[in-house]
């Protein structure tokens, strides 16, 4: 059974750096083709993809946010960490991590999601 | 980036109705499209991938079709648990985008 859970601060100040951790179980991030991604959703708004890391440490970022994002993995701890610099109130959102199955070939869809964590950016 | 436009933005329907939601891409994406269902306060759930492949465990009343720029999600007979917001998502060389969502409400 695949599960993912996000953790991190619920409140950050403008200009600060956000660090979120995704802790997962039921799969290994050393299995060929597997990936873990981050997606966010501002209150009442649509979903926005942020970043994805693969089993082989290949990393992909949203072009519009690439300069602010870093994604890393710790396979031994079953964790993926996302950092976002220079936080702004417009970054207030629920942040989700999600599993990308190796069975999707070269395409990216997310078949298992964490429950999400709401991050508010305010002074 | 490829824009995805869903229509309608909201929809009222009754249990047992057949419902179709459309997602139009600003440029061709072959069949690289997924549909998700999201209920209030919950994470999205994958329903359809590769435009028409049903995710394991998803009821067969859900179906997807289309390729290129025009895609549809159809629910053949609405059930009470289907009232939710639906999003399409495309993959194009890691410029992944989602539609703005379609809210399906009870009439």
Image (tube, grey):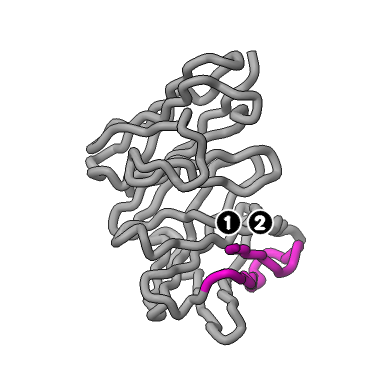
| Residue A57 higher or lower than A20, as above or below | below
The image's mark for residue A50 is: none
| Residue A96 higher or lower than A74, as above or below | above
Query: Start and end of the magenta stretch?
Result: A1-27
Give percent across and percent down for residue B85: 57, 33
Residue located 55% across and 83% down the image: A74
Give percent across and percent down for residue B39: 64, 38
Residue located 29% across and 37% down the image: B26
Few, some or many C-alpha atoms within 10 Å of disc 1 (few <14, some 14-19, many ≥20)?
A: many
Q: Secondary structure at mark 2?
A: loop
| Residue B58 higher or lower than A54, as above or below | above
Asked if residue B60 shows in the view, the reply is yes
Q: Is B20 displayed left or right of A123 in the figure?
A: left
Chain ID of residue with mark 2 = A
Q: Quadrant of the C terminus of chain A?
A: bottom right
* Magenta-colored stretch includes residue A78: no
Residues under numbered marks 1 and 2 in contact, where contact means CB atoms less than 8 Å apart: yes
Give percent across and percent down for residue B70: 29, 31
Q: Secondary structure at mark 1?
A: strand
| Separation of marks 1 and 2 at Cα, in angstroms | 8 Å
Mark 2, residue position:
A116
Mark 1, residue position:
A113
Q: Is A32 displayed left or right of A21 in the figure?
A: left
């Amino acid at each position: 059974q695949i599960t993912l859970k996000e953790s991190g601060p619920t409140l950050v100040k403008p200009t600060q750096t956000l660090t979120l951790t995704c802790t997962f179980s039921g799969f290994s991030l050393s299995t060929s083709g597997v990936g873990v991604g981050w997606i966010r959703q501002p209150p009442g708004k649509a979903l926005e993809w942020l970043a994805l890391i693969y089993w082989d440490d290949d990393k992909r970022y949203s072009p519009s946010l690439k300069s602010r994002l870093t994604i890393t993995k710790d396979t031994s701890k079953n964790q993926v960490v996302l950092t976002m610099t220079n936080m702004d109130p417009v970054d207030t959102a629920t942040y989700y991590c999600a599993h990308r199955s190796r069975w999707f070939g070269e395409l990216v869809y997310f078949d298992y999601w964490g429950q999400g964590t709401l991050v508010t950016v305010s002074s | 980036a490829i824009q995805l436009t869903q229509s309608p933005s909201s929809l009222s329907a009754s249990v047992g109705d057949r419902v179709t939601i459309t997602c139009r891409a600003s440029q061709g994406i072959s069949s690289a499209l997924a549909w998700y269902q999201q209920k209030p306060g919950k994470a999205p759930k994958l329903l359809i991938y590769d435009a028409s492949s049903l995710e394991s465990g998803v009821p067969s009343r859900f179906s997807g079709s289309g390729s290129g720029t025009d895609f549809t999600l159809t629910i053949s007979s609405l059930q009470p648990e289907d009232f939710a917001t639906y999003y399409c998502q495309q993959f194009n060389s890691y410029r992944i985008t989602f539609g703005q969502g379609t809210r399906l409400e009870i009439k």
